[in-house]
Amino acid sequence: YSKITTVIFDVDDTLYDVGTGFTTHRTGDAAHRFMVERLGFSSVEEARAVRDEYFKVYHSTSKALIVAEQEGRFPPMEGAPTPRFRAQDLAEYWASNLDFSLLKGPNTTLQKDLKDCPLKLVAFSNGPRKYVQRVLVELGVLEIFGEERLFAVDDVLPYCKPER
């Protein structure tokens, strides 16, 4: 064990319980609403079909939407900028519109366990950085990881796990 120096946590469904419904809220309803409101999809159903198809391959909404747009899967939208999807727009949307109360506030047990761990702790997510920061703040653990040990999809695009 003495050779292990670092533990990398996948933020979503690891640092918080999958049973909260937060991931389903984020990758389902909220992602689809973003696509309708910001990317010109005519309905949640149309948005869901495209997002889910690409998410199955890339496991990241940001990467899924980048590739879907590159492959011409976005509906036409008069006067829209190119590219239309920007990961930072999704990050801002999620940080401002998600129901973070589903996370149930700071987790004191998680805080204590992480603070007591003698290893270097790293947080990673296929979600955008601004969103990940907000999740870690809501869980009360951002300062334990620190900005320098927080990695998000923005840091690795155009790749994402499990690609490289």
Image (cartoon, helix red, strand yellow):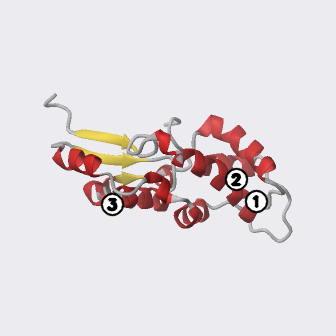
Q: Identify which residue is drawn at 17% across, 31% down.
A: 3
The residue identified by callout 3 is: 147
Task: Please say whether residue 72 is visible from this viewpoint.
Answer: no
Residue 89 position (above or below residue 53) = below
Q: Residue at x 36, y 42 (%)?
A: 9
- Residue 28 horizontal/vertical position (percent): 64, 47
* Nearest to viewer (mark 2 / mark 3): 2
* Disc number lying in front (1 or 3): 1
| Callouts 2 and 1 close, C-beta under 8 Å | yes
What amino acid is at disc 3? Glu
Q: Residue at x 68, y 47 (%)?
A: 67
Residue tagged by mark 2? Answer: 32
Which residue bears the numbered disc 1?
36
- Residue 26 seen anywhere in this rendered image of the structure: yes
Which mark is first along the chain, 3 or 2? 2
Extreme-top residue of the structure: 1
